[in-house]
């Protein structure tokens, strides 16, 4: 398995942004990931 592009802290930050009310599509666009990867 290849290593993750994002650190654990970055992933937690993405999830917290989404919990705070940011749209998933906006977060995915910001970090360059697909919605399927996010979920």
Image (tube, helix red, strand yellow):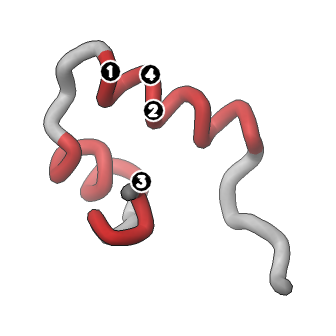
Q: Residue at x 28, y 64 (%)?
A: 35
**Mark in front: 3 vs 4:** 4
Which of the 4 image quarters holds residue 38?
A: bottom left
In this figure, which residue is indicated by the disc labeled 2? 15
Q: Are marks 1 and 4 in contact (CB under 8 Å)?
A: yes
**Where the N terminus falls, by quadrant?**
bottom right
Q: Outermost residue, bottom direction?
A: 1
Query: Where residue 16 appears, x then y in whole percent?
Result: 44, 22
Mark 3 or mark 4, earlier in chain: 4
Query: Where residue 23 appears, x then y in whole percent?
Result: 15, 37
Mark 4 Cα-neighbour bin, 10 Å: few <14, some 14–19, many ≥20: few
Q: Outermost residue, front direction?
A: 39
Q: Mark 4 falls on what kind of element?
A: helix
Q: Are marks 1 and 2 in contact (CB under 8 Å)?
A: yes
In this figure, which residue is indicated by the disc labeled 4? 16
In this figure, which residue is indicated by the disc labeled 1? 19
Q: Are marks 4 and 2 in contact (CB under 8 Å)?
A: yes
Classify 2 as above or below 37. Answer: below
Query: Where residue 6 appears, x then y in whole percent?
Result: 68, 54
Q: Residue at x 30, y 55 (%)?
A: 28
Counting every numbered tag in the picture gives 4
Q: Mark 3 falls on what kind of element?
A: helix
The image's mark for residue 8 is: none
**Where the C terminus falls, by quadrant?**
bottom left
In this figure, which residue is indicated by the disc labeled 3? 31
Q: Mark 2 falls on what kind of element?
A: helix
Q: Mark 1 falls on what kind of element?
A: helix
Mark 1 or mark 3, earlier in chain: 1
């Amino acid at each position: 398995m290849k290593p993750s592009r994002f650190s654990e802290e970055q992933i937690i930050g993405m999830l917290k942004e989404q919990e705070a009310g940011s749209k998933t599509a906006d977060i995915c666009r910001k970090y360059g990931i697909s919605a399927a990867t996010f979920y």
